[in-house]
Image (cartoon, grey):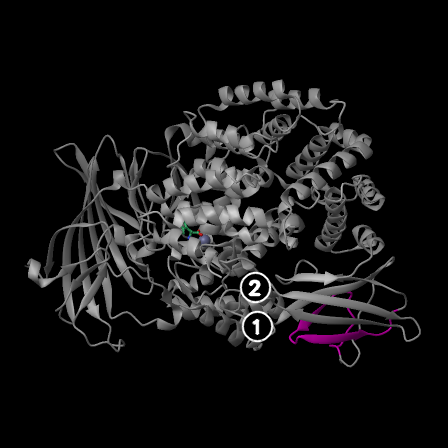
Amino acid sequence: MRDSLPKTIFLKDYQVPEFFIDTTDLHFTLNEDSAVVRARLAIRRNSASSSVAAELHLMGQELKLQSIAIDGQPLSKADFEVTSEFLIIPNVPDEFILESVVEILPHKNTSLEGLYKSSNLFCTQCEAEGFRKITYFLDRPDVMSVYTTTIVADRSKYPVLLSNGNNTEKGVNGDGTHWARWEDPFRKPCYLFALVAGDLECVEKGYTTLSGKNVDLKIFVEAKDTDKCDHAMSSLINAMRWDEEVYGREYDLNIFNIVAVDDFNMGAMENKSLNIFNTSCVLAKPETTTDAGFQRVEGIVAHEYFHNWSGNRVTCRDWFQLSLKEGFTVFRDAEFSSDMGSRTVKRIEDVTLLRTVQFSEDAGPMAHPIRPDSFIEISNFYTVTIYEKGAEIVRMIAHLLGEADFRKGSDLYFDRHDGQAVTCEDFVKAMEDASGKNLIQFRRWYSQAGTPLLTVSGSYDRDGRTYTLNVEQSCGPTPGQKEKEPFHIPLLMSLVSASGEIPLNILGSDDEAGRPRGEMVLDITESKQQFIFTDIPEEPVPSLLRGFSAPVKLSFDYSRDQLMFLITHDTDGFCKWDAAQQLGVRVLNDMVSFYQNDEEMLVDQRLLDAYRAILNDNDLDPAMVALILALPSEAYISELSDEVDVLAINAARKSARKIIANELQEDFWRIYKGHSNNLPYQPTCDQIARRSLKNCALDYLMLLEDGSALESCLAQFSTSSNMTDVLQAFIAIINSPHKDKKQTAIGDFYDRWENEPLVINQWFMAQALCSATGTLDDVKKLMNHAAFDITNPNKARALIGAFTSQNSVNFHQPDGSGYRFLADQIIVLNEINPQIASRLLGPLTKWRKYLPSSQQLMKVELNRILAISDLSKDVYEVVTKSLAV
Ligand code: TRP
Ligand code: ZN
C-alpha cells in the first residue's frame, strides 16, 4: 500500500491562478549525468484572484534546488519551504523576478515525462504536468508565458539544439560545448514547452501559406531514418493546405519542426513549432511500413499540426477541459483523413474503435464524461472517451449546425478566444452564438458519462400509407451518476425500398419549402418520441443512425431478411456495412450457443449468401468488401455480451471463418489472384483498398484444411516488397497449423528486419497475438529476447499490451496465468514508467464482464498490485476505481 493516499482534484474547486508568469527565461546546461536548469520568471499577482495571501506555491517534482533569489536577493533556507511537490515562499511582493537553479537527472528519468534521454537524444514531454519535473513553476495551462530558452551542450554529441519559436542566436564555447538561444513570440502554457538536443539529420521542405508567408518545414531523425520522412512531409503539407481551405487557419511562424524519438509514452506531442513524435508515428517507407502505418502517420502528423490552432493558439483553462482540444482536433484530423482517402472506410474504422474500446470504457469502472468532474492523475484521462467520443460530440454539433454555420462557429471560437485558455463551455457558446441554435440540452453530452441506448421500433400502415417510428432513449448508470437526463441525439435516417430512398414527409411538421428529402435528421430529445411519415407507398426498411450520426447503441428488431436487404440496398455506406455487422453478430451469437450446448457449429446460410453477393459486386469499393467480409471482432461480440464467455466466442468465430472459407473458396481465389499485381507501392486509397481485400481473401484461404493456400502465402511472405503484404502473410503463417513453417518464418523475419526496431515491434506483436495455445510461454520467452526492452513503451505495448488486450483466449486462461503475468509486468513498470503501467492495466479492470471464476482470479491480481509499496498515483487510481463497488 502507498503510505499516503493521493488526493482527488475536482472541477468544482477550480480557482483562477493567484499569480501569473509573464516571461520565462530558461537556461539549460546538458551534462552527461545531469542537467542544470536556471529559470528567470517575471511573476505578477493576479488581481482577479480572491486570495490575498502573500504565499507563492510553485509546483516542482524530483528537482534538486541549488539556489533561489527574488529580485536579485538570494533566499536563505528560512525564507522558503520545499516539499515533494511544491516550493512554498511565504512572503512575496506583488510583482517580482524569481530566479532559481535546479539540478535534474534526465538519464535516470524512465517515466518519459519532463526532460529525459532517449538513446543519445535529450528531449522533453511536458503535457500534462511534466514541466514541473524541469523547473519550479505554475504548471497549469491557464498560466501563459513568453519563453526564451538557451541550451548549452557538447558540440560533437549534440550538434542539434532545438526549442520553441525562432533560433535567434548561437555560438561555440572554448570547452567543446556550443549553445543556441530560441525565442517563442507566442504566449503559451508550459505544457507546450519543448527542448531537443542530439545528433540528428533533417529532411527539409519549404511551404508558402495562402497569404504568402514562407515556412521552413524540417523533420529531424537519426541518420539511418532519413529515407523514411517523405510521407510525413507530404502529409504535413497536405494538412497545412487543408486547414487553410477548410478552417481558414494559417500557420503563424516561419519554422515548423518535427523530431522523431524512440522512447515516447504516446503517439506525438504538439509543442509550439517543435512537435515531438514517437518514431512509429512519423517514419514510413513501403518496405518497412504497413498501409495502416502510413495512414497513422498521415493522421497523427495532421492531428499535431491542427493543434496549432485547436490547442495552442486557443488552449485549455484546466485539464478537465482536455476534450476541448483533443475532441475537436480528432474531429479535424478525421475529416482531413476522410478528404484524403475514403470517407466511408475512415468512418467505419473510427466507429469500430468507438464501439469496441470506447463503449467498453463507458460501461466499465473508469467511465467518465468527456469533461470529467474529478481525477487523481490526469495522465489517466487521455482516453478514448476524451479523444474519440469527444470528437463524436463535435461531429454532432457540426451535423446540427450544418457546414456553413459550423464554420462560422469555429471562426468565432478562434477569433474570440485567440491567445486565451478556455473551457468546453466557451466552445459550445461560440457555436450557439454564431448559428443562433440552442444547444442547452446538447450540453449534457459534456457532463453525463455512459453510452445512450436508442430502442427503435417501426410499423407500416398499408391503408393509411404511413410509417411510424417509435424511439426511446435510456442510459445506464456509470460511477457517480445513477440517473441520466435525456440526451439531445441527432438521428440521421431514411426509409429504404427496393427502388431506393423514399421521400420523407413527417406528419404535423411543415417542412421547409422544397422537395422532401430522402434522408433527414430526427432530433431525439425526450425519453420517448414518435414520428409518423406520410405518403409511404410501400413497406420500407428503415436505415437508422446513418453515418453513425451519434455515439449511441441502437436497437431495432430487424429480421435477418431485412438485414440482407440493407446489405444490398442501403444507400448509406456505413449502414450497409453495419447491417452486415448486425447479421454477423446474430450468426456468431447462434454459434456461441451451439458451442455452449455442444451442438453442431452451423453458419446461417443467409450470411454466406450475403457474403457471396458482396464478393461478386463489382461496383463496390474493394475496401468496403473487405470490411463487410470481416466478421465482427471478438472484442465487439464481447462488448455486446453481459457475461463474456471468451472460449465460446473464440471458438464460434474460428469455426464461422472456416466455414465461410470453405463455402466461398472459389471467390476468394479469384479475388486473391485478381488483386495481386506488381505495381510500385503507393499508399493511395485505391491501392490500400485492393491490398486489404486481397489479404482478407488470403486470410480466409489459409483456413482451408487442404493447405492449398500455403504456397502462395509463403511466396507472398518472401517475395513481396511491401510490409503490408509481408506482414499479412507472416501473420497468416504463424497462425496456421504448419508449425515448422511458423518457426522458419519467425526466424527469417527477424534476420531480415533485425536493424529496423519498428518492424521488430510488429514481429513481437504478431507473435503476441497468435491464437494458438502456448502463446503465453512464447511471450514470456520473447521478454528475454535481446531486441526486447521493457523501458521502451512501443515494445512494452507490442508484446505485453497486444497479448493482454487483444489475445483474449490466451490472456483469459482458466488457471489465471495470463492475469498473473500481466500483474507481474505492471509491478515492474510501476517503478519504471507509471503512465505505461497504468495503461497496460486496462484488461484487468474489466473483470466484472467475465465468468465468476475468472473474476476471482482477476481480483486477486488487482489486490496484489494494490498491496505493493510505492504504488504510483497512476496505477493507484485505476486499481482502486476498478475494485470499488
Ligand atoms: N497532446 C498529445 C496529443 O494528443 C497527447 C500526448 C502526447 C500526451 N504525449 C503525452 C499526453 C504524454 C499525456 C502524456 O496529440
Ligand atoms: Zn491531440
Is disc 2's CB within 8 Å of ligand 1?
no
| In-front residue for pair 862/478 | 862
Circle number at residue 484: 1
Locate residue 172 relative to residue 264 in the image: left or right. Answer: left
| In-front residue for pair 237/619 | 619
The answer to whether marks 2 and 1 mark residues whose Cβ atoms lie closer than 8 Å is yes
**Residue 109 image point, x, y percent:** 28, 42
Name the residue: 85% across, 43% down: 605
**Residue 819 image point, x, y percent:** 50, 42
Name the residue: 19% across, 37% down: 31
Question: Residue flagged by tag 2: what amino acid is it?
Answer: Gly
Q: Is residue 245 visible?
A: no
**Residue 125 image point, x, y percent:** 34, 48
Name the residue: 23% across, 63% down: 21
Magenta-span inclusion, residue 515:
yes
Q: Is residue 794 visible?
A: yes
Which of the 4 image quadrants contains residue 395?
bottom right
Marks 2 and 1, Cα distance to the nearest angstrom? 9 Å
Secondary element under disc 1, as helix, strand or loop, is loop
**Residue 785 image point, x, y percent:** 43, 25
Locate residue 227 relative to residue 99 in the image: left or right. Answer: right
Magenta-span inclusion, residue 113:
no
Circle number at residue 782: none
Segment tinted magenta in the rendering: 511-536
Residue at the disc numbered 2:
450
Name the residue: 64% across, 55% down: 642
Secondary element under disc 2, as helix, strand or loop, is loop
| In-front residue for pair 818/260 | 818
Question: Residue flagged by tag 1: what amino acid is it?
Answer: Lys
Count of labels shown? 2
Q: Is residue 544 above or below residue 103?
A: below
Q: Residues within 10 Å of mark 2 (few under 14, many from 20)?
A: many
